[in-house]
Image (spheres, rainbow, N blue to C red):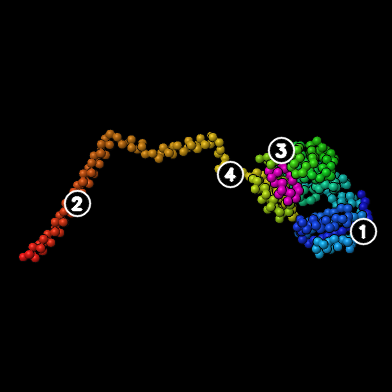
């Protein structure tokens, strides 16, 4: 498809604007063209807004519109005439990601044997395998399969071109559901499924997150892929937890390494934990699983309660000393009584001795006093 006579308005921001500021700038520029794109650059540290139109925009009017939002300056330039489809295809060489080999329709070389081969062209949907997040998800799926994980019912959320759904279908040899909220992506994914002989194995549905009736009706899933963005991953965490099987795995991407903490925290709060992670350049892939239940929570129900009582009863009997008292019988008991009497006699004798001694002392103590008194009288 050849394009010519187009003009672009480009606004570069050396920082990541707030959502409100970004929307205001987009609204200011949108009237000057037919198409607008807005995305982060420089690993999320800056932002770029572009507007494309069929006629040259009024530079003074563009600047006046921006001045109402702050001190911003946009660049206005004609778009070179190019065959953008051919240009994009030339920029997408074939690639290998673990057991997968992905190529476009322009590929002229020999296809490798022993690989899972997909033909995916650049187009209206995201996911050609060239981006680190898509490639990372494919590598994570391959690692799960290599470690012995066997998926029986996978789901791909935000399927785009359908590449991850295709990867799961071929890798685990099972049917897969892929969902996307973009109509163009749904159409492209269905076309790619037919192109790669996966029309029966992969079912593509229009779904906003996990809301489609097809997805809700097929839950739970033992493998879920969601290669979207960090904020949607956080927002959809409860929905993921609601459809993921207890023995399942979730492969999440579309996030930068700096966003891992937020995504992990949102899922950890729901009982999920990190199984492993992959990092490709500045991007991250998180593979999650359900956290193991605490050991204290395992005993439950009437049987466990009965066992607990049965263990406690013998301990209570041991505390009673009655058996020891019963053993003292016969001759031993008589000897014991005799010993008690003898002790009692000694005690009483001791008391009498103490009484006599104290009396003697009193008498002795009184004699000097009596003598003194008699002397005084004399």
Callout 4 crowding tier (Cα within 10 Å): few <14, some 14–19, many ≥20: few
Chain-order first, disc 1 or disc 3: 1
Chain-order first, disc 2 or disc 3: 3
Chain-order first, disc 2 or disc 4: 4
Q: CA distance from mark 1 to mark 3?
A: 52 Å
Contact between marks 1 and 3 (CB within 8 A): the answer is no
Contact between marks 2 and 4 (CB within 8 A): the answer is no
The quadrant in which residue 345 appears is top left
Q: CA distance from mark 4 to mark 1?
A: 66 Å
Is 160 within the magenta? no
Q: Which residue is mark 2?
A: 354
- The foreground one among 114 and 319 is 319
Q: Which residues are magenta?
A: 221-241
Say above or below: 256 vs 160: below
In this orientation, does residue 298 appear? yes
Q: CA distance from mark 2 to mark 1?
A: 128 Å
Callout 1 crowding tier (Cα within 10 Å): few <14, some 14–19, many ≥20: some
Residue 56: mark in rendering: 1
Q: Callout 4: helix, strand or loop?
A: loop
Q: Which residue is mark 4?
A: 294
Q: Residue at x 36, y 36 (%)?
A: 323
């Amino acid at each position: 498809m050849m394009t010519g006579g187009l003009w672009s308005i480009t606004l570069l921001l050396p920082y990541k604007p707030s959502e409100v500021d970004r929307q205001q700038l987009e609204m200011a520029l949108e009237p000057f063209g037919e198409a607008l794109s807005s995305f982060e650059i420089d690993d999320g540290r800056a932002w770029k807004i572009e507007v494309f139109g069929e006629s040259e925009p009024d530079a003074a009017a563009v600047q006046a519109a921006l001045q109402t939002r702050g001190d911003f300056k946009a660049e206005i330039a004609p778009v070179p005439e190019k065959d953008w489809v051919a240009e994009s295809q030339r920029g997408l060489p074939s690639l290998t990601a673990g057991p997968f080999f992905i190529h476009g329709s322009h590929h002229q070389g020999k296809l490798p044997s022993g690989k899972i081969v997909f033909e995916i062209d650049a187009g209206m949907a995201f996911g050609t395998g060239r981006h680190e997040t898509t490639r990372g998800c494919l590598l994570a799926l391959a690692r799960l399969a290599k470690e012995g994980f066997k998926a029986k019912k996978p789901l791909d959320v935000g399927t785009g071109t359908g590449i991850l759904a295709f990867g799961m279908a071929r890798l685990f040899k099972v049917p897969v559901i892929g969902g996307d909220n973009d109509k163009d992506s749904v159409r492209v994914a269905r076309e790619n499924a037919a192109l790669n002989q996966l029309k029966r194995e992969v079912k593509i549905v229009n779904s906003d997150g996990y809301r489609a009736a097809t997805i809700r009706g097929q839950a739970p899933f033992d493998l879920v892929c969601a290669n979207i963005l960090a904020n949607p991953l956080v927002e959809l965490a409860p929905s993921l937890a609601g459809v993921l099987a207890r023995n399942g795995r979730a492969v999440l991407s579309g996030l930068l390494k700096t966003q891992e903490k937020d995504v992990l925290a949102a899922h950890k709060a729901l009982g999920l934990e990190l199984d492993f992670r992959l990092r490709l350049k500045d991007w991250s892939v998180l593979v999650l699983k359900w956290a193991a239940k605490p050991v204290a929570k395992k005993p439950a129900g009437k049987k466990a309660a009965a066992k607990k009582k049965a263990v406690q009863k013998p301990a209570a009997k041991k505390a009673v000393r009655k058996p020891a008292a019963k053993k003292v019988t016969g001759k031993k008991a008589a000897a014991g009584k005799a010993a008690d009497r003898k002790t009692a006699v000694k005690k009483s004798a001791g008391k009498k001795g103490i009484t006599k001694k104290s009396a003697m002392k009193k008498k002795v103590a009184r004699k000097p006093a009596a003598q003194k008194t008699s002397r005084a009288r004399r």
